[in-house]
Amino acid sequence: MKKLDRKSRKRKPAIFLSHSSKDNILVTQLALHLNHLGIDVWMDDWELEVGDNLNQRIREAIQKSQYLGIVVTPSFLKSEWCKKELADALAKEKALRKKVVLPLRFKKAKMPELLVEERIYLDFTLHYFTELAQLAGMIHGFSRKKLTTAIGYKHLKKINEVEDLLKTCGWDGVSLIDADYFNDVKKLKGVTVRGNTIEFYPDEVVRLNPKISKVLKQLILQ
């Protein structure tokens, strides 16, 4: 695991997840999985604090993030705020003249009008983990050919299957963990700390620390 300092001024998130607040549970799970796969995610619930200027923080996050993941659901389509974030993301894409916006379809939602011009999207509706592998692999910089060849005709069903597949493509296997949790994990028995990274065998750490909190146990075993 590698420590992720969300407050660092040098931080440039790999992906900003634009979504409706009504889909927080779904999007939080997606964000946790991406963190586990070594991808820095910007999500409002994790970043915004009391007193923050909402518009300014969102605008800054969109500008700093490498990609803008648009989590398209029925709730997203009804949200004016989400439509604004999408418009800002498309404006950034147009200014940079490169792919920035990544449509992510959930719950069989129709694609927004701004994204219907034959834009390819990832459809998480039926095969969540297979699409997760495609998304994470693309963000890590693996070619479409390498990813589709590795996946073949398989439908991945677990996060560890995604993890193993990405390792065959060249991922180093290092997950990201928030600084607060990093400091808690490094105190556990059975871990080796090397600067901003921690090395351990999950099952062994859980065995050596029977009173580990539910949250840390989930992070370690996920």
Image (cartoon, rainbow, N blue to C red):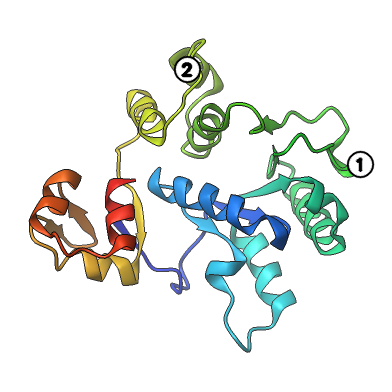
Q: Position of residue 204 (x, y in %)?
A: 11, 47
Which mark, by number, is residue 92? Answer: none
Q: Looking at the rendering, in which quadrant would you find the C terminus? A: top left
**Which residue: 47% across, 17% down?**
151
Q: Quadrant of residue 51?
A: bottom right
Q: Position of residue 66 (x, y in %)?
A: 58, 51
Mark closest to the chain's N terminus, 2 or 1: 1
Give the residue at the far top of this rendering: 153
Taking the image as shown, residue 134 lies to the left or right of residue 73, namely left
Task: Report the amino acid beneath label 2.
Answer: Ile
Taking the image as shown, residue 175 lies to the left or right of residue 206, namely right
Q: Secondary structure at mark 2?
A: helix
**Which residue: 84% across, 36% down?**
110
Q: Position of residue 184 (x, y in %)?
A: 23, 69
The residue labelled by disc 1 is 113
Whether the residues at callouts 2 and 1 have beta carbons within 8 Å, the answer is no
Task: Report the amino acid beneath label 1.
Answer: Glu
**Which residue: 52% across, 17% down?**
148
Q: Quadrant of residue 115?
A: top right
The residue labelled by disc 2 is 151
Taking the image as shown, residue 51 lies to the left or right of residue 94, namely left
Q: Is residue 66 visible?
A: no
Where is 159 relative to 80, above or below?
above
Give the residue at the far bottom of this rendering: 51
Q: Position of residue 107 (x, y in %)?
A: 72, 38
Q: Secondary structure at mark 1?
A: helix
